[in-house]
Image: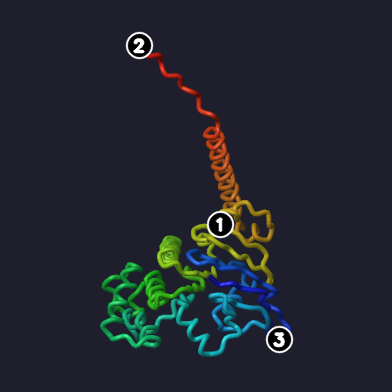
Amino acid sequence: MIEVKNIHKSFGDKTIIKDVSAVMKAGQCNLIIGTSGSGKTVLMKCMVGLFAPDSGEVLYHGQDFTAMNAEDKTEIRKEIGMLFQGAALFDSLTVEQNVMFPLSMFTKWTFRKKHERVNEVLARVNLVDANKKFPSELSGGMKKRVALARAIVLNPKFLFCDEPNSGLDPQTSLVIDRLIKEITIEYNITTVVNTHDMNSVMEIGNYILYMYQGNKEWEGTNKEIIFSKNQRLNDFIFASEFLKDAKDMRMLEETGKISNERNMEELLDKDAPTLVPPPDDE
């Protein structure tokens, strides 16, 4: 779990983050959404330690990351995996070498053990036999999967994904979303996703933090967002007429499910008729 408490961040006279608090739980996908300039990227960078907040706390295991010394911060960073927006693979290294890079930096494992672990995570992201390929030989979706394999190779407790679907077609984006969700649940990772992709919001948004002009404007789940009455959130998520219609249809569908469930509960709560056995023949 990661807890953010009353984070403030400014650059010069411009305030970017204003008193934002949130709790990101393990085993679920925690999404940060908002328009460009809303502060979501700065918030994520404060969480991973790329920016130091002006005030507030970022708690890992209940300990304030911002107040730690360099040695303790390094220990926390060993538990963090990062999926960068553009995948950020090393062009001169093979897939295998890219995924192995964190193991070479942070472990003293033998090459054989590192190689076995690389094969494990590549298999997990459905990239068997891609070891010797170079990034230039991969599609956009394959690059993201290699980057995801590298992000989880150290078996992190925390996974940060910055626009994981950027530049991908809708079908490939769905594959990446589902893969992130599966890995999050399978390894009980606290996953934080910074995204503009509304398909991601509806597909994997166990917890959603909506940022607006540096403030926490709304928080909830992908189920609750359908019924949200926050106008700014609705204008952002359901911007087109098509999406507005889709929201209305989903609301009707969810309302119908709730009504049916309540009716079933009422039926089950009623006393069943008493069955009187027939008299014995004499």
Q: Give x and y (percent) for residue 58.
A: 60, 77
Distance, label 3 to label 1, CA atoms, is: 36 Å
Which amino acid, by three-letter code, is at mark 1? Answer: Asn
Q: Quadrant of residue 214?
A: bottom right
Please give the label number shown on residue 12: 3
Question: Toward the viewer: 169 or 212?
Answer: 212
Checking the image for residue 222, the label placed there is 1
Horizontally, residue 238 falls left or right of residue 132, namely: right
Quarter holding residue 99: bottom left
- Are circles 2 and 3 on residues that touch, CB within 8 Å? no
Name the one closer to the observer, 1 or 231: 1
Q: Which residue is mark 2?
A: 281
Q: Amino acid at mark 3?
A: Gly
Q: Which comes before the other along the chain, label 2 or label 1? A: 1
The colour mode here is: rainbow
Residues at marks 2 and 3, CA–CA distance in whole angstroms = 97 Å
Spatial CA distance of label 2 from label 1 is 63 Å
Q: Decide which of 54, 157 is in the foreground and name it.
A: 157
Bin the neighbour count of mark 3 within 10 Å (Cα to Cα): few under 14, some 14-19, many 20 and up. few
Q: What secondary structure is marked by label 1?
A: loop
Q: Nearer the viewer, mark 3 or mark 1?
A: 1
